Image (tube, coloured by chain):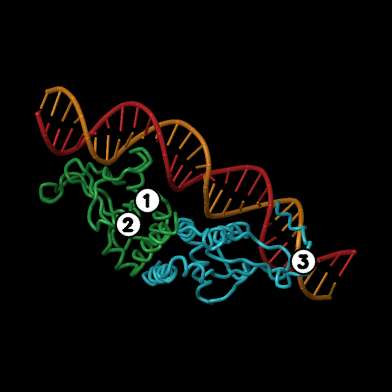
Chain colours: A cyan, B green, C orange, D red
Amino acid sequence: MGSPKESGAAVTSPTVSSRDLPHPVRDEIRLEGVLHALSDPMRLRIVRELAGVGGELSCSHFDLPVTKSTTTHHFRVLRESGVIRQVYRGTAKMNGLRREDLDELFPGLLDALLDAAARQVVRGG
Amino acid sequence: MGSPKESGAAVTSPTVSSRDLPHPVRDEIRLEGVLHALSDPMRLRIVRELAGVGGELSCSHFDLPVTKSTTTHHFRVLRESGVIRQVYRGTAKMNGLRREDLDELFPGLLDALLDAAARQVVRGG
DNA sequence: CGACTCGTACGATAGGCATCGTAGTACGGC
DNA sequence: GCCGTACTACGATGCCTATCGTACGAGTCG
């Protein structure tokens, strides 16, 4: 299941380029999953950057010290845990924080996490 | 490193029962480590229970669905990440949240995490 | 001392995961 | 139609880790 070939009603979905990616629904997001996703330095860095711009960023915008395969992996972990939303826009893949969903599920958590990460950086991390 | 055998000045430490355990100093506590520690359901449960009583609890107080070896392992992860403080009290080993240290390092984080965990439980998880 | 309880240490195991490299697919422009 | 760019898929690898069982050490109480 899930061959991206299918396009029976493509004409009726204007905003979708063509293929779309599996995201957990808001109520499927698990705290443990979110914490696990953010416990990796690379992923925490991605989330911090996304929160910084407050909008969407393409995968290629990030200059991480790992290969592109690994970068793809990290973005998938973030998406599957419900932290970010990914959508194809032409050849680029745009990433955005799921702030509303997270704030609704866990009020104050995301801000506390971002603040904690920022403080750690200031302390010399 | 870290052979607990060493005890050059044991006579001068009155409050210590006998053996003591390696804890990270406050400034050594890493956010990633804390998040990783709390991303395990068993450990999150332990921390929630510790926060609930607001004091110390012995390891044996917890009735976790794993063996004692595994329980020991989880407590060690929590201690080494800086989330809890462990101290021997006779034959028992008491565990307490390092609330002050965590609040100082990451203001609001622990409360946000506990609140998030509580909400998730209420939602049926 | 001896027995019992609490917790540790160690080895084994199985699964997860961060990383890489290479080969391949989708899209947009020439 | 062809090429370049952006990202993916897949397989390999080595490390980390959650789990167990058994054997052991430290204290307490009779």
Q: Position of residue A90 (x, y in %)?
A: 72, 70
Q: SS of the residue at dot 3? A: helix
> Residue A51 versus residue A26: which sits nearer the camera?
A26
Q: Chain of mark 2?
A: B
Residue A125 is tagged as none
Residue position marked by numbered label 2 in the rendering: B83
Q: Chain of mark 1?
A: B
Residue position marked by numbered label 3 in the rendering: A10
Please determine if labels 3 and 2 lie on a single subunit: no
- The part of the image, by quadrant, that contains residue B34 is bottom left
Going by the numbered disc 2, the residue's amino acid type is: Val
Q: Position of residue A54 (x, y in %)?
A: 53, 76
Please determine if labels 3 and 1 lie on a single subunit: no
Q: Chain of mark 3?
A: A
Residue position marked by numbered label 1 in the rendering: B43
| Residue at mark 1 to residue at mark 2: CA–CA distance | 10 Å
Q: Height in image: A60 above or below A74?
A: below
How packed is label 1: few (under 14 Cα within 10 Å), some, or many (20 or more)?
some
Q: What residue do we see at 70% from left, 51% from top?
A: A1
Q: What residue do we see at 36% from left, 61% from top?
A: B114
Asked whether, in this view, residue A16 is left or right of residue B21, the answer is right
Going by the numbered disc 3, the residue's amino acid type is: Ala
Task: Answer whether labels 3 and 1 touch (C-beta < 8 Å).
Answer: no
Asked whether, in this view, residue C13 is left or right of residue B103, the answer is right
Asked whether, in this view, residue B40 is left or right of residue A5, the answer is left
Q: Nearer the viewer, mark 3 or mark 1?
A: 3
Task: Answer whether labels 1 and 2 touch (C-beta < 8 Å).
Answer: yes
Return the disc, 1 or 2, that comes first in the chain's sequence.
1
Q: Nearer the viewer, mark 1 or mark 2?
A: 1
Q: SS of the residue at dot 1? A: helix
Going by the numbered disc 1, the residue's amino acid type is: Arg
